[in-house]
Image: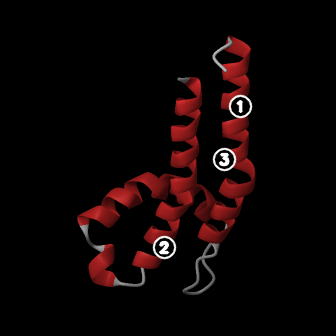
């Protein structure tokens, strides 16, 4: 049971960067960017991207904050969260 939960969490953690990339790429296509689906994705990723936009302002028309956000997510946040969850399951005896 715990292994299945870990698989679902791992899948969700690996899907989030894809949502960020899709959201950023959709900003180049105005009709797509205004769709309800991209609005829903924006609701999921914009709070996270907003943290980095406050630190790294756009340079002209180029916004580098999504790149930094993706790197931070891939190499810091997702592994730390997943390792913490595995440790919690081991500590409670579920794994």
Distance between the alpha carbons at the discs numbered 2 and 1: 29 Å
The nearer-to-camera label among 2 and 3 is 3
* Residue 31 located left or right of residue 28: left
Q: Residue furthest top?
A: 92
Is residue 36 placed above or below 58 in the rendered structure?
above
Q: Residue furthest bottom?
A: 60
Judging by the rendered image, the residue that carries numbered circle 1 is: 84
* Residue 80 located left or right of residue 52: right
- Please tell me which of labels 2 and 3 falls first in the chain: 2
Callout 1 touching callout 3 (CB < 8 Å): no
Distance between the alpha carbons at the discs numbered 1 and 3: 10 Å
Disc 1, SS: helix
Which residue is rendered at x = 67% and y = 38% of the image? 82
Is residue 8 placed above or below 32 in the rendered structure?
above
Judging by the rendered image, the residue that carries numbered circle 2 is: 24
Distance between the alpha carbons at the discs numbered 2 and 3: 20 Å
The nearer-to-camera label among 2 and 1 is 1
- Place of residue 12 in the rendered image (x, y in percent of width and height, measured from the top left): 51, 47
Q: Nearer the viewer, residue 17 or 6?
A: 6
- Place of residue 39 in the rendered image (x, y in percent of width and height, measured from the top left): 32, 62
Judging by the rendered image, the residue that carries numbered circle 3 is: 78
Figure quadrant of residue 63: bottom right
* Residue 30 located left or right of residue 93: left
Which residue is rendered at x = 33% and y = 66% of the image? 38
- Place of residue 7 in the rendered image (x, y in percent of width and height, measured from the top left): 56, 39
Is residue 60 placed above or below 41 in the rendered structure?
below
């Amino acid at each position: 049971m715990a292994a299945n939960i870990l698989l679902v969490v791992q899948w969700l953690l690996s899907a989030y960067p894809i949502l960020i990339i899709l959201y950023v790429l959709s900003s180049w296509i105005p009709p797509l960017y205004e769709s309800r689906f991209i609005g829903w994705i924006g609701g999921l990723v914009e709070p996270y991207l907003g943290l980095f936009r406050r630190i790294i302002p756009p340079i002209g028309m180029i916004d580098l904050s999504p790149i930094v956000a993706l790197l931070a997510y891939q190499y810091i946040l997702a592994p730390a969260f997943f390792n913490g969850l595995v440790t919690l399951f081991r500590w409670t005896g579920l794994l």
